[in-house]
Image (cartoon, rainbow, N blue to C red):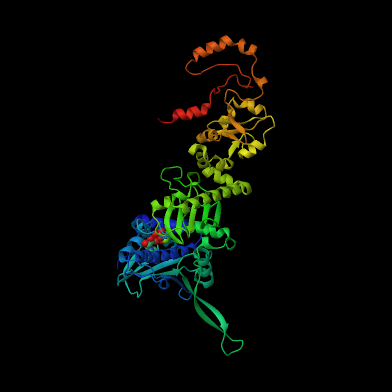
Amino acid sequence: MAKKQFKAESKRLLEMMINSIYTQREIFLRELISNASDAIDKIYYKALADDNLVFDKDNYYVKITADQANRTLVISDTGIGMTKDELENNLGIIAKSGSLAFKKENEAKDGHNIIGQFGVGFYSAFMVADEITVISKPLGSDEAFKWESKGADGYTIEPAEKAAVGTEITLKIKPNTEDDNYDEFLEQYRLKAIVKKYSDFIRYPIKMDITGKRPKEGEENEFEDYTEEQTVNSMIPIWRKNKSELKSEDYENFYQEKRYGFDKPLKHIHVSADGAVVYNAILFIPENTPFDYYTKEYEKGLELYANGVLIMNKCADLLPDYFSFVKGMVDSEDLSLNISREMLQHDRQLTLIAKNIKSKIKSGLQSLLKDEREKYETFYKAFGRQLKFGVYSDYGANKDLLQDLLLFTSSREKKLVTLDEYVSGMPEEQKFIYYATGESIERIEKLPQTEMVADKGYEILYFTDDIDEFAIKMLMSYKEKEFKSVSSGDLGIDSEDKPSEAEENEYKELFEQMKTILADKVKNVKASKRLKTHPVCLSAEGELSIEMEKVLKAMPG
Ligand code: ADP
Ligand code: MG
């Protein structure tokens, strides 16, 4: 029988993938188990819609069997199985995900818990196996097929025998080399530990035959081996577990398992609320800005579960825009399973949960700022702009919530400071919080306008982001100190710094002439004492700073 070639791009991808996507080999097991769990979910969702199909929980499980003598590891499931075409399409083309297609088809109907979507997980098995055999019998068919491949050079498909519906994947585990040990993937205890680590909360039993020793009956000091089938995973979702039982690793695994991002989260927030509204939530502050974050394509939202069953992938109502970077999930017993999207918007419980979550995120960020400053600054570099948008939007309605989360570069040591830090460092006589706007720190430092304020020994906040000054205008003041641009006409620094009348008059004629020549460029020309080493500078007369006027002029409309 002719061996089929992987599609060309698949071949290259496969090699790349095997060597680079995953850094830890052991995750192949997580991927195969997720696929098996997805396959069982598919039957579960079919049964929801089809009265002729009964989903009896006891019949659905994943089984892992290692055979050291033959160097095989078998992962079998009682899931929906694959037809010949599906074997060909889903396993023959890398980056093609049958699960994603299934999700899309079923989006309108019930929710789903299906994890797969990238179409690469299966191939991770080639990190540990030099040959993979998949025998599958799809639901509603009497025919089974066998797919077999030794990696990059292709695969074969042929008819096979299989009694029960489902899929059986046999990995021929690679021989050990000088540098790499593969034997571990044939050892019960090692396998059991990997399952616990990555797949503990998979909702179906993951079974293994575990051998142990027990005293031999009737004979003293004699022991015998016995084998017993055990369910290895606890099946309790991580969010239902006690915080004290969980390590940060568990949360990181969950983040990766759920594909919330490819980065490592900076912080997790685990909420178990049982007050006015009962819910569990696991929220993450990511480390990196998603590539589409500041575009219209980015969709905010948290996964929403009603009593353990996923009802919505991205529930936007749970997150305010200024916290749109947060990833995670919420599970509540108080929500009804068949609640529609429209109903959700008006659901009182959901509104309460959203409000509660907002304050949890806020205090989570505050504690990150307080206790792990470096991490907070990493976060702020990725998402600070969004917080500033938050201050600016809704006419500053969120300023109390957000103002203490803001950071700006300070003229002192060019470090990021909070407004509180700025105000605490102000000398007694300083009346305003000074800021200067510009494209970059280097540019701002060259501004003649900063001289006078800096000379006084006052700290200046450097605004290099367009949104900075707009946000600050919404705040108006912080701890009763108003913000003042260093380019504003009146700096509010002691009056003796104003030129005397005699000084004003001395160059009156020159100023008048300058005004005539610059008629359409400036409003006024006058003497000033704010400059030290520069002969002249521009300053703003009204509410808007020069930089802000520039931004407004550049805006369309
Ligand atoms: P993903 O899970 O991201 O879709 P995978 O490479 O892990 O990508 O799997 C590719 C596809 O193969 C899945 O989407 C699914 O359609 C199919 N598949 C893999 N394993 C199984 C299985 N055990 N039972 C049924 N279908 C499976
Ligand atoms: Mg998968």
Vertical placement of 292 versus 75: above or below? above
For the image, the number of numbered tags is 0
- Percent coordinates x, y for residue 45 in the rendering: 37, 63
- Percent coordinates x, y for residue 522 in the rendering: 51, 18
Residues 418 and 219: in front is: 418
Residues 340 and 280: in front is: 340
Residue at point 61% right, 27% down? 450
Residue 334: in sight, yes or no? yes
Residue at point 38% right, 54% down? 340
Q: Quadrant of the C terminus?
A: top left
Q: Quadrant of the N terminus?
A: bottom left
Q: Is residue 396 left or right of residue 299?
A: right
Vertical placement of 443 versus 526: above or below? below
Q: Is residue 252 left or right of residue 139?
A: right
Point out the residue furthest to the bottom here: 218
Quadrant observed for ligand 1 in the rendered image: bottom left
Point out the residue furthest to the top here: 509
- Percent coordinates x, y for residue 252 in the rendering: 53, 57
- Percent coordinates x, y for residue 547 in the rendering: 51, 28
Point out the residue furthest to the right here: 428
Vertical placement of 40 versus 487: above or below? below
Residue at point 50% right, 74% down? 230
Residues 180 and 517: in front is: 517
The answer to which quarter of the image holds residue 51 is bottom left
Residue 4: in sight, yes or no? no
